[in-house]
Image: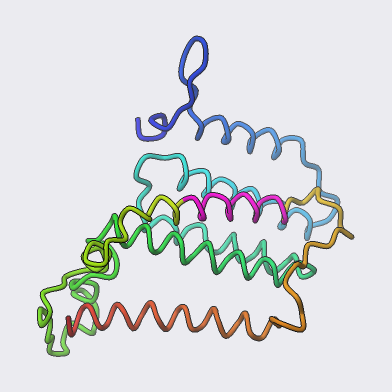
């Protein structure tokens, strides 16, 4: 039922958006005829990324753990499209940031909470939590009155998802240029650094929420 709850109205019955896009994926997969093994791998990574983005956007309360299943296909797709590496990395950073903010706010018992490390080796380190009586990132969102902005972050996730699929569509013109990120302003190395900083910030917040506040 959760796959059919997000719909748009028609004259007779409501149409499931998830299944509509799933059928599109199936048709593309059936009609595709890659000539080389590298093209096959690229097409498969694109189709799998498309499927999981469809799941996260149009399934009612897709579980946040499932995003781990999409990540390998997303990075294979990005890494194989070297001509558009910068714009892909930029969009991927926006994709991950937006969905983490949304998921950490809604599924507060899964990530960025004071039980994040309860089943890991870190559980043996003394905890100094509840100093500020904050149990999760979701509570911080409420304290600073940002919950009303969550639809904006989810909209960003949706738009960036579509942009990634469009830019990396296997049938897109090979010589098309979409490198809108100026090399003189932001280099690939800077994008790597920004990506690493995002990871550090996430894990730092996890540790602070679990051990301190």
Residue reaching furthest to the right: 175
Coordinates of residue 33 in the picture (x, y in percent): 81, 43
Q: Based on the picture, tell me whether residue 162 belongs to the magenta stretch.
A: yes
Q: Is residue 191 left or right of residue 126?
A: right
Q: Is residue 184 left or right of residue 119?
A: right
Residue in front for this viewpoint, 95 or 140: 140
Q: Is residue 91 above or below residue 10?
A: below
**Secondary structure mostly taken by the magenta-highlighted segment of the chain:** helix
- Residue bounds of the magenta highlight: 155-167
Colour convention of the picture: rainbow
- Position of the C terminus, as image quadrant, is bottom left
Q: Is residue 183 above or below residue 70?
A: below
Coordinates of residue 62 in the picture (x, y in percent): 38, 47
Residue reaching furthest to the front: 145
Q: Is residue 92 above or below residue 122?
A: above
Q: Based on the picture, tell me whether residue 54 belongs to the magenta stretch.
A: no
């Amino acid at each position: 039922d959760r796959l059919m709850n997000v719909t748009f109205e028609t004259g007779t019955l409501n149409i499931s958006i998830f299944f509509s896009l799933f059928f599109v994926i199936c048709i593309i997969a059936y009609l595709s005829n890659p000539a080389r093994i590298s093209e096959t791998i690229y097409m498969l990574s694109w189709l799998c990324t498309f499927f999981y983005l469809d799941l996260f956007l149009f399934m009612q309360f897709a579980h946040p753990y499932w995003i781990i299943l999409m990540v390998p296909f997303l990075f294979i797709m990005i890494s194989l499209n070297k001509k558009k590496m910068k714009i892909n990395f930029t969009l991927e950073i926006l994709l991950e940031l937006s969905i983490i903010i949304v998921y950490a706010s809604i599924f507060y018992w899964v990530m960025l909470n004071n039980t994040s490390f309860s089943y890991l080796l870190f559980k043996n380190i003394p905890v100094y939590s509840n100093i500020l009586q904050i149990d999760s990132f979701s509570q911080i969102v409420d304290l600073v009155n940002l919950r009303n902005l969550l639809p904006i972050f989810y909209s960003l996730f949706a738009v960036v998802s579509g942009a990634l699929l469009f830019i990396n569509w296997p049938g897109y013109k090979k010589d098309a240029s979409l490198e809108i990120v100026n090399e003189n302003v932001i280099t690939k190395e800077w994008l790597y650094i920004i990506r690493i900083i995002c990871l550090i910030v996430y894990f730092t917040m996890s540790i602070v929420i679990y051990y301190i506040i």
